Image (cartoon, rainbow, N blue to C red):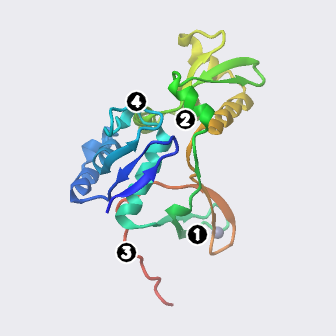
Amino acid sequence: MPSHIICPSGLAGEVRGLTGKEGKLLADRSLARSGATIDRILGSCWVQTTDAGVYELADGANPDWSKVLVGDRFYALVQIRRASFGDEYAFSVQCEAASCRERFEWELKLGDLSVRALSNEAKAAFRNGNRFETALPRGDRKVWFRLLSGADEVRAATLRRQGRENLLLEAVGLRIVEIEGVADKDRRRFLEDVELADLTALLDAFEHVDGGIETSIEVECPSCQAVQDVDLPFERGFFFPRARKERPTP
Ligand SMILES: [Zn+2]
């Protein structure tokens, strides 16, 4: 049954659960390598648009998912998953404590994850050319950055697969549009010399405007009770949930 959803940017519409057709998409490795799997799943499970939100769409048309903000894409994907397999998501975590290292299963309800809507200021800035201003607190320079869309997500996945060593720098570089007084061709070299404190300030500025699902969650190790933060893993069980394994009784 289709369910009506409202994404963080205000984009609203109906989504349906996965069918055998999408099961085939998920198993297609060459599609996965091209990074196109998620676009295809969103494209086929988004039934209709009821509010175009920040996007320019013909009446009722489906969005061009490569241009949709990553926060909206992930939100829609989670709702498709809920419509397909329900709200419970189980994944495995390894305890960070050096003396423990226990591997355990953690389960949560996807509907309990908090969602942050895109602010009205951010919506306006996105519509007005997707340009956001911040500054390097130490370097004392203005920086303009943008919100990421589906096309960037594919690019970021390619960078990760290529095993680029400095992922922090890649992540920052992907979002910057302009740095005051720095030519585009020199930007990369400029960023390599920026103080780490300035880079993390940039990440904070990005996070401050982003809308989407909060994916940083707290888990507690059942063996040593240590609490750690993990980033919600997007693993096989997300779209291929297994039946719960019973623990063998000793
Ligand atoms: Zn532990």
Marked residue nearer the N-terminal end (4 or 3):
4
Front position among marks 1 and 4: 4
Give the residue type that dot 3 points to: Ala
Task: Please determine whether, in this image, residue 176 is positioned above or below residue 213.
Answer: above
State the residue position of label 1: 102
Residue 172 position, x and y percent, is 58, 30
Label 2 vs label 1: CA separation? 28 Å
> Element type at marker 2?
helix
Q: Position of residue 96 (x, y in %)?
A: 63, 60
Q: Amino acid at mark 1?
A: Glu
Image coordinates of residue 183 in percent, x first then y, are 58, 9
Q: Nearer the viewer, residue 102 or 72?
A: 72
State the separation of the CA atoms marked 4 and 3: 42 Å
Circle nearer the viewer, 2 or 1: 2
Q: Is residue 153 left or right of residue 39?
A: right
Q: CA distance from mark 1 to mark 4?
A: 49 Å
Q: Answer with left or right where residue 34 lies relative to residue 155.
A: left
Within 10 Å of disc 2 (Cα), the crowding (few <14, some 14-19, many 20+) is few
> Ligand 1 appears in which quadrant?
bottom right
Question: Which residue is tagged 4?
Answer: 56
What amino acid is labelled 2 in the image?
Answer: Leu
Residue denoted by label 2: 167
In the image, which is nearer the foreground, mark 1 or mark 3? 3
- What residue did someone put label 3 on? 243
Of badges 4 and 3, nearer the viewer stands 4
